[in-house]
Structure formats: C-alpha cells, structure tokens
Image (cartoon, coloured by chain):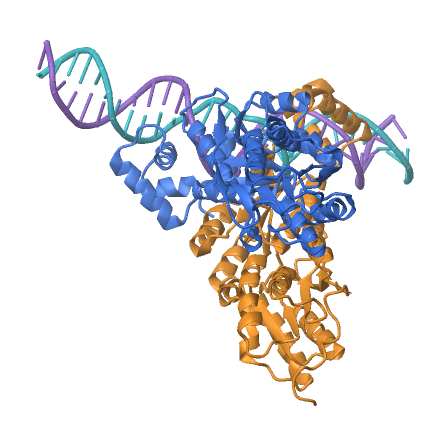
Chain colours: A orange, B blue, C cyan, D purple
Amino acid sequence: MPGIKDVAERAGLSVATVSRALSGKGNVSPRSKERARTAAAELGFVVSYQASSLASGRNHNVGLVVPSVHRWFFSSVVEGVSATLLDAGYDLTLYNVSEGRERRHSVLNDFLLRKRVDAVIAVSLELSEAEIDQLLAIHRPIVGIGGPLPGASTIRIDDSGIAEAAARHLIQLGHSKIAHMTGDAAYEQDFRLPGTRQAGFKKAMRDAGLALRPEWQVSADFTIQGAYANARKLLGSSPERPTAVFAASDEMAIGTILAARDFGLRVPQDLSVIGIDGHELGEVFGLTTFDQDARGQGALAVRRLLARFDGAGDTAAAHTEYPTRFVIRSSTAVPPLEQGPIR
Amino acid sequence: MPGIKDVAERAGLSVATVSRALSGKGNVSPRSKERARTAAAELGFVVSYQASSLASGRNHNVGLVVPSVHRWFFSSVVEGVSATLLDAGYDLTLYNVSEGRERRHSVLNDFLLRKRVDAVIAVSLELSEAEIDQLLAIHRPIVGIGGPLPGASTIRIDDSGIAEAAARHLIQLGHSKIAHMTGDAAYEQDFRLPGTRQAGFKKAMRDAGLALRPEWQVSADFTIQGAYANARKLLGSSPERPTAVFAASDEMAIGTILAARDFGLRVPQDLSVIGIDGHELGEVFGLTTFDQDARGQGALAVRRLLARFDGAGDTAAAHTEYPTRFVIRSSTAVPPLEQGPIR
DNA sequence: CTCACAGTTGCAAGCGCTTCCAAAACCGTG
DNA sequence: CACGGTTTTGGAAGCGCTTGCAACTGTGAG
C-alpha cells in the first residue's frame, strides 16, 4: 500500500508539497500539482484518513444518529444522507440507537466524543438538555432533522401546519366525525412529533367548531402493523364510527386502510384516510398525503454541513422549514350520506 | 479533551503502561490496571481511535455494504449489525451503494481501501471477480450475507431448499396451478438470489410433475409496490388464473395479496400466497412464510468478525447455512374447487 | 545468599499524514 | 542589476497512541 512518501519520491517532490497538492490547501504551482496528481494516480495512492485526521483534526466522516432504521422516514433520511456524503467523499458512521436510553447514552458518550466524526446529524431525537450540551461540547457542527434541537441547526417540516391543513382538507370535504391516529406516548418522549401534529389537528377541529371525541383519538407506534391493530379497535368497537381518519404518518394511514378493508369499509366511500409522509406505498393505496421529501431533507443536511466545512463558516444555528407537497389521491372524498335520523 | 498522557500523569504511571492497562494487551499488574482505569474514568478519557489505529492498525470500525436501506432484508441486517457492533464498542460505517455500479466502484476503491475499516460485511452483493480481488487484497476479513462471495466467509440461508419447500407446501395442499414471482433480472445481476430461489421452485414443480407455465413466471423488484403492479397483471389478464403464488420475498407476497384483494379474490380461499422472509407485516396479512432472521444474520456476521479480531484467528473462509423457520399462517390453504369442466 | 526466570515497567521509535517556519525561487520595478 | 514582495518549496515537528526492547522487580530454587 503506497504512502505519501512513495508519491513524493515518484513525483520528485517533497512530502509536504504532495500533501498540499493533493489536498488543495496552500499554494502549489500548477506544475507540481499536476505531477503529484499523476504520481498518486499511477501508484493508486489514496490518503489515509486516519493519519490525515490525526494531523489535521478533520475526519471526512459524519455521524448519523437515528432512532430506527426500519421506519420509512428514517431509512429515507439515511438514504439521502448516505448518497450525498458518498458523492462528497465522506464516510457515514451510522448510530442506530433504537434500543433505548442506555444505548443512546453510550453512543453520545463513547462514540461521538471520540472525535471520530466531523459533524453529527441527529434525526428526530428528543434529547435531554445534558445530552445536547454534550453534543455541543464537542464543538462540531450538528444538524437536527425532524425534531427540535436547541442550539443546533435544524431542518424540519411545518408539522403543525400540515397537520392542520390535512384536517382542514377533511373538514372541507364535509367530514365532521374525524378521528386522529397519533404517535404513542413512548414516541412523544423521544421525538415530540406526535404532539406537534396533534396540535395542528386540534386547532383545525377547534377552528371548525368540531368536537374532539376522546375515543377517536388513538395512537400507535408509527408502524403499519401497530396502526392496523389499533385502527381495528377504533373502527370495530366504537358505537359510532368516524367517517375520516387523519393519521400522523403514512405508515399509520396504511395500517388504518388495511383495518378498514377488514371491516368491509370502502376507502374513500365509507371512510376517508389521510396521512403525512410521501411513503412509496402511498401510490398502491391511493393515499392522500403530504409529501415530505425525507431523502431530500437528508441530502440538504449534508449539503449544509459540507458548506460549513468549506469554510462558508456560518456558525450560527439556522432553522430551515422544508417544504411539503400536498398529494391528493383517492383515499379522501366526501363523507357517506348520513344514515341516522334525518337531519 | 484529556489524552493518555493526562491519564498517565494522574495515575502515576507511564503512558505505555496506561495504554496496556486500558487495552488489555500485555502484562500489567492488577494494581496498575486499577489505577489506570480509575484515572481514565475520572478524567473521562476515551482513546482516540484515530491515533490508536494509526499506531496499531486496528480501527474499531467495520464497513457494511448494502445495496439499499429500504428493503426489509437489508434494513434488518443493518439493525442486527449495528446493535451488535455498538455493544462491542465498534463503529459502523455504512455504504449504501444503491445507485448503480459507479457508486459501488468508488466505494470499493476509495473508501474500503483507505483502511478505515477492520472488516467488511457485504450484503447480497454480486461482485465481479475484480471487485472481489480488490476486497481480498486489503487483507481484511470479509463476510458476505445472503449471497455468494468466493473467497470470503458467508452466511446464507438455504435459498433453493426453502424455495423448494415453499413450493412443495403448496403442492401438498393440492395446488397444481402455481405461479412464481421472482426477482427482476436487474436484481439477478446484483444479488443472484432470484435465480437460486427460482431453481428451488422449479425443482419442486418438476418433481411433482407439474408444468411451468411461462405466463405464470413473473418478476418484480422485491418491493410491495412493484409486486403489486405485476401481480395485478398476472391475476387480471391470464385467461386462467393460478390458484397459488409463491413469491420470492414477503414484500412481493404482500404486494400479491393486495393485488388479489383488488380483484375480489379471497386469500387463501381463492388464492394461496406464500413468501420468504419473516417480514414484520406478515402478521397483518396472515402470511405463510419462511422466517429468515435477517437481524440475526447481521448479528452473527459481527460476532464472527469479533471472534476473528480476538485472535480466534480462523482465517479460513467459513460458510454458514443460517436456519430458517417455516411459519404457517392463514395465506395458504387447499385450492378452491375446480370450476371448469368436470374432471 | 546468589542465580535464573517470569512478570512489570518505561523509554523511545514510529504509524502516515499536515502544517509551521524559514529558505529558495521567482517576479516586476526602480 | 539590485531590491522588496510574492509564490513555491522542503525540513521537521508534531497529532495521540501502540509496542519492541531493555531495564527493572520480585520470586523460589539451588
């Protein structure tokens, strides 16, 4: 395995000049630069980031902390981050902290602090103040996606806004018996998303003068199967059935649609369902949803960091509201005709 | 940020002894070890893997190369690998090479060769001989999951065997009009899975003396939505419908079930469907399948590597056949009564 | 009491780079 | 042609750790 020394020798230059030539830092005559480059290419030389980082402090590596790798949003972000990073020649160190607090704690402590990463992207993590301080203490850029992260830059969609818009969409279609499937309390603790979206829903309902029936406020774990199970309860046991369900994620919306089918309910004729995400399966189910381009959010986070690395050193924490797109498909429609007493 | 020097000072030991005490290599008296440990703990010291790896050649970092992070099998493997690695104090560098050959090429070349990783886990990648040579040339342990990887250790399930068993299950129920949904040719190139499973299917059919109708051999991209689209064609256009479908993955089986429902076909009364995977959604759809514990495969791969690192230096390439579990749910049953001419 | 030996320890030489610093080479002017 | 200023270059000092080596300690046997 060739080292920079070999390159220097072959190019007839000093190690220092080769280093500068290949990294692009410092002044090097075009001629030397060219020489160094060809010599490196001929030898198949590629710098050791280990050594490079020891000497320079830069790692060419960013850490991505996600709470799961299975759920749509997270894997989409991972994809976007990964692709953008790879293109830029950076490594991606993945920290999947799905298994509870100790895992998370050890990741933050033992891993990120080892200075192995130049920056951290934290997805939908609700961190304690101590944890945030810890992160900020390593003096590396941090960007949070899909969740608040005081002190760091964040990229997020207008959760409460689109939740409100989703609910309003149903209301405008004529629905008044609207159920909401939100995230489990357990998730609220970690992500805080559910609450924000729920707030938007409630606002829309209140603004329309509609009642919030507690038995129509259900929750699940953000998965299709979890939502399916709970939607069955919602649709099966209620003395009166809602005519529409607003699910806080597409996966939960899909679970709801599957449950509805089990009861012979047609979507949208008997039940309207709307979600949030832009999940690939949305098409299959004709799901009306707000498309938040998760992949794009991941890519944006990386671009942000890269800009920072390149010295466009805007150290100030910037908060970006990522745009969403309302996609109307066939899972929402006007409510069925009232079957009860003539109104 | 404290260095090993600070620890040495505080413990009243030399840097060398502290290094040995903390790494567990070489002889250190219990007393010194204890001292070094407490000093390190008090200072919150944690070795810099950068420096450590420069000096020792060991990275505490393994590279995981996956063709996608969205599909069930891959994200499950990622999860297993990640958890096991984190527990062992190793970092995971993720290389998602979903976007074609150049990406893959650059990953192999520029990234893995930088010696940033102690080992490589390659999931379901069909590599060219040159690529394999390249990988082997870096003299790091490699383990392949779910695909052949000549020269490296592999962990895989008995693809053709369970495919055969799946088909036999249908045959034994009395089916003879069995369709097979395999992977796209595009995937065959990369993963070779489809072919192996297809071979098992064909064998079972041949052994039972059943005909393989070309129009019942369909393929998709291993996703629910892809399978859904193609299953619609299969079930909608055939002059004669199959009574059972064997899908090469659970995701494709689910897509098939969704398509069947669209046509008013009841599963399993009108159509039996069987898959392979053990996908979380299997429960929701009552899917009969072979559970291959993908998470477990990832974990096993890591344990294998860790053992190697610890000097249980069995350098020989070992091939493990990972066990699967046949899970019978409600998507398979005896075929419907023949509707055609009296037999 | 001495010797051989195994168990401990510290010194110092790197690991492969980056970067500070000073020297060398170059440039256009006066 | 000499001069100051600007590039370009190479020497060498690290970055924070590991590890070969030699020196040292303590032990039980002779």
In the image, residue A58 sits, relative to residue C26, either above or below, namely below
Q: Residue at x 64, y 71 (%)?
A: A245
Q: Residue furthest bottom?
A: A343
- Closer to the camera in the image, B343 or A184: B343
Residue occupying image coordinates x 47% and y 21%: B315
Which of these two is toward me, B127 or C27?
B127
Q: Residue at x 56, y 34 (%)?
A: B168
- Specify the farthest residue to the front: B342
Q: Is there any visible trace of residue A178 in the rendered image?
A: yes
Residue C26 at x, y percent in the picture: 84, 29
Is A203 or B135 nearer to us in this picture?
A: A203
Is A164 in front, or is A191? A164
Q: Is residue C16 above or below residue B45?
A: above
Q: How many marks?
A: 0
**Is residue A55 in view from this perspective?**
no
Q: Position of residue A264 (x, y in %)?
A: 64, 66
Q: Quadrant of residue B182?
A: top right
Residue B269 pos. (x, y %): 60, 51
Image quadrant in which you'd find residue A210: bottom right
Q: Does B152 sit left or right of B202 as displayed?
A: left
Vertical side of A226 occupied by B35: above or below: above
Left/right of residue A224 with respect to residue B102 in the rendered view: left
Q: Is residue B183 above or below residue B150?
A: below
Quadrant housing the C terminus of chain B:
top right
| Residue B251 in picture, x, y percent from top left | 63, 46
